[in-house]
């Protein structure tokens, strides 16, 4: 290929790259990606919190059989608050 053809190809590639960079740095795209990331974080945190609550409630129900923990759970009324939250759902 001649040097002139190579320059034309390089210029076309440079223009295409410049357009892609401008598109990636646009305000609308940044706003959309930020909102998408925020929604994803909220959904993920909700799922993790739900799993932790399920595990905690299973642990509390099984921990009543351990003498010291059973007394603590009954005196702190933790089980009643967990059951009350489950009933509200």
Image (tube, rainbow, N blue to C red):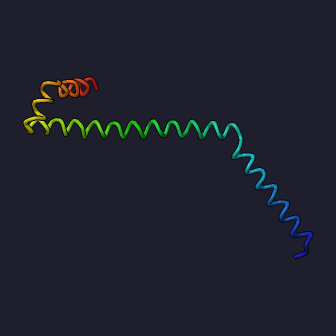
Q: Is residue 18 above or below residue 32?
A: below
Residue 35: give x, y in percent of width and height. Answer: 57, 36
Quarter of the figure that contains the C terminus: top left
Marks counted in the figure total 0
Which residue is depicted at the point 82% across and 55% down? 15
Q: Give the side of residue 60 with respect to residue 36, left or right.
A: left
Which residue is depicted at the point 83% across and 60% down? 12
Q: Is residue 55 above or below residue 13?
A: above
Residue 29: give x, y in percent of width and height. Answer: 66, 40
Which residue is depicted at the point 65% across and 40% down? 30
Quarter of the figure that contains the N terminus: bottom right
Rendering quarter of residue 43:
top left
Rendering quarter of residue 85:
top left
Residue 76: give x, y in percent of width and height. Answer: 17, 25
Q: Is residue 40 above or below residue 20?
A: above
Which residue is depicted at the point 58% across and 38% down? 34
Rendering quarter of residue 75:
top left
Q: Residue furthest front?
A: 68
């Amino acid at each position: 290929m001649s040097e002139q053809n190579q320059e034309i190809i390089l210029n076309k590639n440079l223009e295409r790259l410049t357009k892609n960079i401008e598109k990636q740095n646009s305000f609308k795209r940044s706003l959309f990606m930020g909102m998408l990331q925020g929604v994803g974080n909220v959904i993920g945190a909700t799922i993790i919190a739900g799993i932790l609550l399920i595990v905690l409630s299973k642990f509390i129900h099984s921990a009543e059989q351990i003498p010291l923990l059973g007394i603590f759970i009954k005196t702190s009324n933790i089980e009643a608050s967990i059951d009350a939250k489950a009933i509200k759902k």
